[in-house]
Image: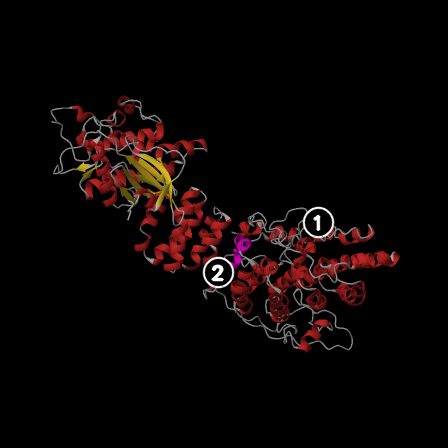
Amino acid sequence: MWFFARDPVRDFPFELSPEPPEGGPPGPWALHRGRKKATGSAVSIFVYEVKPGAEEQTQVAKAAFKRLKTLRHPNILAYIDGLETEKCLHIVTEAVTPLGTYLKARAEAGGLKEQELSWGLHQIVKALSFLVNDCNLIHNNVCMAAVFVDRAGEWKLGGLDYMYSAQGNGGGPPSKGIPELEQYDPPELADNSNRAVKEKWSADMWRLGCLIWEVFNGSLPRAAALRNPGKIPKSLVTHYCELVGANPKVRPNPARFLQNCRAPGGFMSNRFVETNLFLEEIQIKEPAEKQKFFQELSKSLDSFPEDFCRHKVLPQLLTAFEFGNAGAVVLTPLFKVGKFLSAEEYQQKIIPVVVKMFSSTDRAMRIRLLQQMEQFIQYLDEPTVNTQIFPHVVHGFLDTNPAIREQTVKSMLLLAPKLNEANLNVELMKHFARLQAKDDQGPIRCNTTVCLGKIGSYLSASTRHRVLTSAFSRATKDPFAPSRVAGVLGFAATHNLYSMDDCAHKILPVLCGLTVDPEKSVRDQAFKTIRSFLSKLESVSEDPTQLAEVEKDVHAASSPGTGGAAASWAGWAVTGVSSLTSKLIRAHPTPMPSETTVPQRPVPEGNPAPAPAPDTPVTSGRWETQEEEKDSAGDSASADRWDDEDWGSLEQEAESVLAQQDDWSVKGPGSRAGQVSHPDHRPVESDWNRWEAEGSWGQGWQEPSSVEPPPEGTRLASEYNWGGAEPSDKGDPFAALSVRPSTQVRPLRAQLGWAAARR
């Protein structure tokens, strides 16, 4: 029977990359890239080939192997595995790059920032302090070649080949025999009498001075060059001179050096170093300290290196959420760091956390998620949205806090393209029906109408036929003037989804009733829309052959092409939780007096005017954001700007024989504050009521239960930019989102400028 000896190199769970070695410390070690066979994760492998006649060098390599294996410190190269045979030594460490190679690559890309260099040197000095003060060891090889950088930009001290004990019980310092390394030795070592008074750290601190010089000025040509600081920052020059002073006795202890550099105004006193130090000790920090840190972190991330954010900040944020009960405070920095991730990384690291957050009962977290949904919605697939996200989001429609209800409505435009038939056409419509008819907040009723108009193209043909006309008709009877304007513009935005018969018998009669509305902005939009629909009907009357082309979208299964038109017709009457809804909450935390005088719309003869219902008090929540103050003078100065604007896109469409240009935008910005009058609320005879009779919608589309006068400064829906070519102060938050998202992942921040502007 034959027995074959196993090859330990072949059985080693790590393999070398076929690429040539990257380099390494001067001497016999060669640094290779590698990977773990089982997982494919990247590692670095230091390889030493045993050669005949090099016994002393082999002993040095074995000593380095042992030191690296036994020393554990965050700032010392992390040992993972090793292999020792008669022919070679393999040391597997975390994936790193030699500092010289790293600095050269970054210099080509624009160079390292001073804050990055300050933290890198801080790490090396801290490693030296650990060795000399805690382990009583002298590194004896501090230089550029002994420093490595990991994927997060963290500097690690390696090159432990010539380390020895400071107590002298293991013999003196080993001989190096390499000229490239001997030039970093301090001048007192050349004194054979060894009479110089020195500290145990003196030699390593001299070498640290050499390292600092090389980091800022390049390779050290000779020891005399240390006299000229060159490009070393002024805040570091004083402390650098202490390191390279001729008297070894005055060279500071590494711990003392760190303390000096961390003093106010010092080289290592900056936000980046403070952030890193906090992250290293975050597990022992008090909850209040963590909350404050994460709140301030988001402001600093823009100036921090991308690799640092991805590989150091992100894991800490995920850990803080998973195990530290950090809550909603981690969301803003989490999504900010998420911008640096690839689509695959985002799916692996961020999405599982987001899905879990949606199931939270923390109101602050729920509203933060809804406010920032545009940052991650493109990474959510349809099954995840329908089974894990939407069932939790819909609870926001029933929340007692108006801010959450408002934000939940707005989030539907982002979720609608991903919802299935049941969630979109049944569940969502049920909630929209109740909100539009019964919600006590006028801005929320208005926003529900706006959202319905924007997602109308995603609804099934049967749902569109039964919902849109009735919903917009009901909005035109709302006591809140912006809601009436939203209803009018909703008809215009979804014009291609109605048959000519519906236009003549259902839509125009409703619009004509608004021509005597007490609010001029409502009358103006009604007249414009009436002219547009009449022009469209007239063009079909002149040429009946156009009917099929005009009604081509009426019975279509879905009409994603109309999303652009729907997106352009209306910006939110109330943009964000920090706007009018919050103003209502803060300005009127208690029920308003029932005797408030409210102008009434003329009541047709024979129809009794209903008595106003009592108002419902609204409870404010601590998670509300602060409202941006508006300049009242500027608002009133632009009071009637809409009167000068050109609506006529639909009229142009009819005049050009229905050129199928679905541009329903209103040219020019609109922004003013106005007083809102409240006409009587009358029931609507429509298909909407037949849905109630069928029992599909419960009593969701009944009349609002209360009528509230709006606060001073209320902005009408007609005063916002509804998608025109000219920019407005806030813009349409959803103008670019009504078309179905493509499979290509692209950031929504570019599409949703309003979100960035609000935050």
Q: Residue at x 36, y 55 (%)?
A: 290
The residues tagged by marks 1 and 2 sit, at their Cα atoms, a distance apart of 40 Å
Counting from the top left corner in percent of width and height, residue 433 is at: 64, 69
Question: Callout 2, which amino acid?
Answer: Val
Q: Which residue is identified by label 1?
A: 667
Q: Which residue is identified by label 2?
A: 355
Q: Which of 68 and 376 is in front in this view?
A: 68
Vertical arrangement, residue 485 with respect to residue 14, above or below: below
Q: Nearer the viewer, residue 59 or 721?
A: 59
Query: Chief secondary structure of the magenta span?
Result: helix
Residue 538 visible to the viewer: no
Count of numbered circles in the view: 2
Q: Identify the secondary structure beneath mark 2.
A: helix
Q: Nearer the viewer, mark 1 or mark 2?
A: 2
The span picked out in magenta is 366-379
Q: Nearer the viewer, residue 109 or 715?
A: 109
* Marks 1 and 2 close (CB-CB < 8 Å): no
Q: Which residue is drawn at 38% across and 52% down?
A: 316
